[in-house]
Image: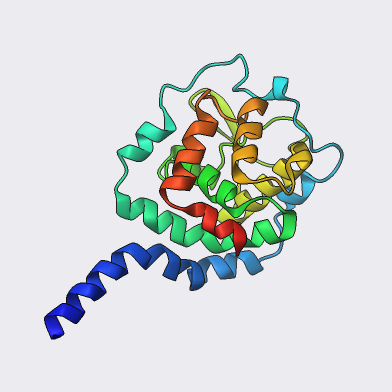
């Protein structure tokens, strides 16, 4: 009987680990969320926050030599799970405040940062690959011939993505994750024409859409 109980515990612990962590998020991220807004994030609110897609370095510019989904495939599953567990609470908070699906926020950060392993995520806390363009008045960092936004904290990156998304895609507010994924791809936010397809694959593969109803 003891062996049976132990076997069931191991089986269900593996399948439910992400759900448990969503309900009990990392206290470090809770502390980050309590910090005041960074000046650079607030600066994005001054003037027009809309970034015309012609200003995005991905449009008509140099294509990345790496494909995000391929990079994720080479990332340890434990690292991907840890990333999602770490930022699930933040994504839910941004969903509540701005009406952007938490699944879109979490999947986009997972995709654009290679589960936190990308250079700009490590060196600049930029988990969404947002460029230094438009009305951005914050710090920047050079990476692969491009200028990306630099943040002091991971939380600031998530908040700035929310400001960017609601400023450029307010017409998507209230829509489901599929509509958001397609809208983001059409805008040219990513340098891959499979962005929507890849994003939906992540959301559905990890069942991140369950976050949207929380």
The quadrant in which residue 37 appears is bottom right
Q: Is residue 119 left or right of residue 147?
A: left
Q: Is residue 7 above or below residue 153?
A: below
* Residue shown at the point (50%, 32%) measured from the top left: 197
Quadrant of the frame with the N terminus: bottom left
Q: What residue is rendered at 56% in x and 51% in y?
A: 103
Is residue 169 visible in this depiction of the protein? yes
Q: Quarter holding the C terminus?
A: bottom right
* 194 relative position to 136: left or right: left
Instruction: Choose top left, top right, bottom left or bottom right for residue 70.
Output: top left
From the viewer's perspective, is 108 left or right of 115? right
Tell me if residue 62 comes above or below residue 162 in the rendering. Answer: above
Residue 151 place in picture, x, y as percent: 61, 48
Query: Does 126 appear above or below 60?
Result: below
Q: Nearer the viewer, residue 46 or 202?
A: 202
Q: Nearer the viewer, residue 189 or 138?
A: 189
Q: What residue is rendered at 60% in x and 44% in y? A: 177
């Amino acid at each position: 009987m003891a062996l049976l109980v132990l076997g069931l515990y191991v089986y269900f612990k593996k399948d439910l680990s992400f759900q448990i962590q969503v309900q009990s998020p990392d206290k470090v991220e809770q502390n980050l969320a309590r910090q005041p807004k960074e000046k650079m994030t607030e600066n994005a609110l001054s003037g027009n926050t809309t970034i015309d897609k012609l200003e995005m370095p991905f449009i008509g510019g140099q294509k990345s030599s790496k494909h995000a989904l391929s990079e994720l495939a080479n990332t340890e599953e434990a690292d991907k799970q840890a990333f999602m567990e770490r930022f699930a609470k933040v994504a839910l908070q941004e969903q509540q405040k701005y009406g952007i699906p938490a699944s879109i926020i979490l999947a986009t950060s997972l995709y654009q940062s290679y589960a936190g392993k990308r250079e700009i995520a490590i060196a600049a806390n930029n988990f969404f690959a947002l460029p230094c363009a438009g009305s951005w008045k914050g710090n920047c960092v050079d990476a692969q011939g491009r200028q990306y936004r630099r943040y002091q904290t991971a939380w600031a990156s998530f908040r700035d993505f929310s400001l960017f998304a609601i400023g450029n895609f307010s017409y998507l507010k209230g829509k489901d994750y599929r509509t958001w994924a397609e809208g983001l791809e059409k805008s040219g936010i990513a340098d891959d024409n499979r962005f929507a397809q890849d994003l939906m694959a992540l959301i559905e593969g990890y069942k991140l859409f369950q976050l949207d109803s929380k």
